[in-house]
């Protein structure tokens, strides 16, 4: 069909030259890691996504976001579990944990307003058995201040 035209060295050389013109040749580049600040080198073409998105020196640096979450967490669950253990503060159940807003304002995501509770105690808090749960929550919150 193509009579072996695409398997010749001259064709392959022309294709490599075309890709080099479009995206630049494969070269060694140096950048500074955004996480640890160390300088690192890598091979890539200059006009590619791989070059632009290379920010970290290693996989461990790219996966380590512990400091980043402290100021950038925007979801209330992430904020809650940074400051509280991921378990019910009343019974210690850790399989399913819900987050309760103490002032019932969903927009107030301050760490002291977010309390981890199991589904049972969370529902009790929003029912007629509220008085059985509130003293335990106040006791827990009093120890945090």
Image (spheres, rainbow, N blue to C red):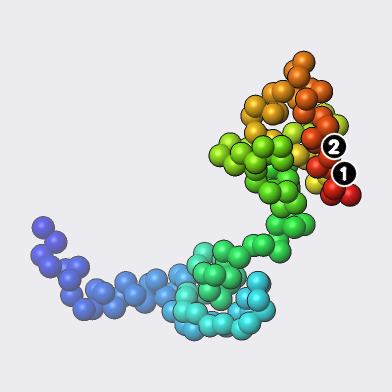
Residue 67, position as x, y percentages in the image = 71, 64
The quarter of the picture where the N terminus appears is bottom left
Q: How far apart are marks 1 and 2 (CA)?
A: 6 Å
Q: Which of 53 and 132 is in front in this view?
A: 132
Label 1: which residue? 142
Dot 1 falls on a residue whose secondary structure is helix
Q: Is residue 24 left or right of residue 81?
A: left
Splitting the image into 4 quarters, where does residue 53 fall? bottom right
Q: Is residue 134 left or right of residue 64?
A: right
Q: Judge whether residue 107 can be spotted in this image.
A: no
Residue found at x 82% / y 23%: 131
Q: How crowded is mark 2: few (under 14 residues within 10 Å), some or many (20 or more)?
A: few
Label 2: which residue? 138
Residue 5, position as x, y percentages in the image = 16, 68
Residue found farthest to the top: 128
Circles 1 and 2: CB atoms closer than 8 Å: yes
Decide: is 24 above or below 103. Answer: below
């Amino acid at each position: 069909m193509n009579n072996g035209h695409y398997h010749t060295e001259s064709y392959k050389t022309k294709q490599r030259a075309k890709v080099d013109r479009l995206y630049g040749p494969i070269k060694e580049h140096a950048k500074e890691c955004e996480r640890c600040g160390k300088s690192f080198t890598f091979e890539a073409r200059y006009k590619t996504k791989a070059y632009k998105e290379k920010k970290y020196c290693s996989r461990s640096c790219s996966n380590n976001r512990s400091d980043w979450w402290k100021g950038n967490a925007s979801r209330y669950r992430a904020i809650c579990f940074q400051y509280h253990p991921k378990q019910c503060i009343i019974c210690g159940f850790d399989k399913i944990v819900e987050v309760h807003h103490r002032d019932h304002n969903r927009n107030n995501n301050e760490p002291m307003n977010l309390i981890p509770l199991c589904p049972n105690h969370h529902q009790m808090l929003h029912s007629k058995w509220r008085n059985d749960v509130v003293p335990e929550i106040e006791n827990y919150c009093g120890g945090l201040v």
